Image (cartoon, rainbow, N blue to C red):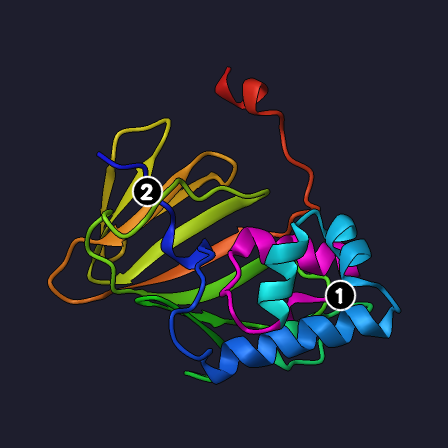
Amino acid sequence: MRRAFVPWIMDHPLTKPAEPSTSDLGRRVRAARQAQDLTLETASRLCGVSRSTLSKVENGLMSPTFDVLQKIVLGLKIEIGELFGSTPKVSAGGRRALTRKDAGQRHAYRGYQMELLATDLAHKAMLPFRIRISAHTLDAFDDWGRHEGEEFLYVISGSVCLYSELYAPTHLNAGDSIYFDSRTGHAAVSTSDEDAEVLWMATSADIPQAPVDAAKK
């Protein structure tokens, strides 16, 4: 079996003109970099991504992985919502964010539709997404997905198989959920005839994580 790359955190060069959402995201990344008077080379070092990758993202030629998005927002010290046109607000207390149906910020990948939720709230401890998974096999993916943080996946409709480099494939039906370490290689595909819809939540990259070795004990 080929190692699988989790669909919604995937980089891939676009073979056709970038969709507006990808182009808009790229322009916002460039604007954030230029607002700090950073060269592409300096920004790539701060973000921990290659100059080539950052350039492709800025020019709308690559749909960045969640891992790359994390690195960009941390390196440029911005909020992920800013990359999707939101202006996150900081509140001292009583924090809340309301997202109406289909009103989240969208980001498309090949065969995967991600909707970012609660993007108007800054400094969140978790990042919630609603994702439609249309991939039904692992053949399209080249490698495991992995990034900093922890994740929670809840199946809203359809069925999903979550593959992991440490565990046997886990089959999930509507109503099932799973929580796991994002640093462990993982991938998810729809196993139902229709596309699966899931609620996928990830902790921010700066949330303290237990050492992997300690977690295995």
Q: Which residue bears the numbered disc 2?
A: 4
Whether residue 102 sits left or right of residue 182 in the image: it is left
Task: Kindly identify which numbered label has been placed on residue 33.
Answer: none
Q: Is the N terminus in the top left, top right, bottom left or bottom right quadrant?
A: top left
Viewer-proximal residue among 212 and 94: 212
The residue depicted at 23 percent of the width and 48 percent of the height is 139
Q: Seen in the image, is 205 located left or right of residue 179?
A: right
Residue position marked by numbered label 1 in the rendering: 78
Looking at the image, residue 75 sits to the left or right of residue 185; the answer is right
Name the one closer to the observer, 148 or 171: 148
Q: Which residues are magenta?
A: 59-82
- Whole-angstrom CA distance, mark 2 to mark 1, is 30 Å
* SS under mark 1: loop
* Amino acid type, label 2: Ala
Q: Secondary structure at mark 2?
A: loop
Label 2 packing within 10 angstroms: few (<14), some (14-19), many (20+): many
Image position of 155 with respect to 145: above or below: below
Residue 76 at x, y percent in the picture = 78, 61
Q: Residue at image x 85%, y 64%?
A: 38
Q: Are marks 2 and 1 in contact (CB under 8 Å)?
A: no
Q: Amino acid at mark 1?
A: Ile
Residue 193 x %, y %: 11, 63
Q: Residue furthest right?
A: 37
Q: Residue at x 44, y 55 (%)?
A: 10
Look at the picture and state if 159 lies above or below 86.
Answer: above
Residue 147 found in image quarter: top right
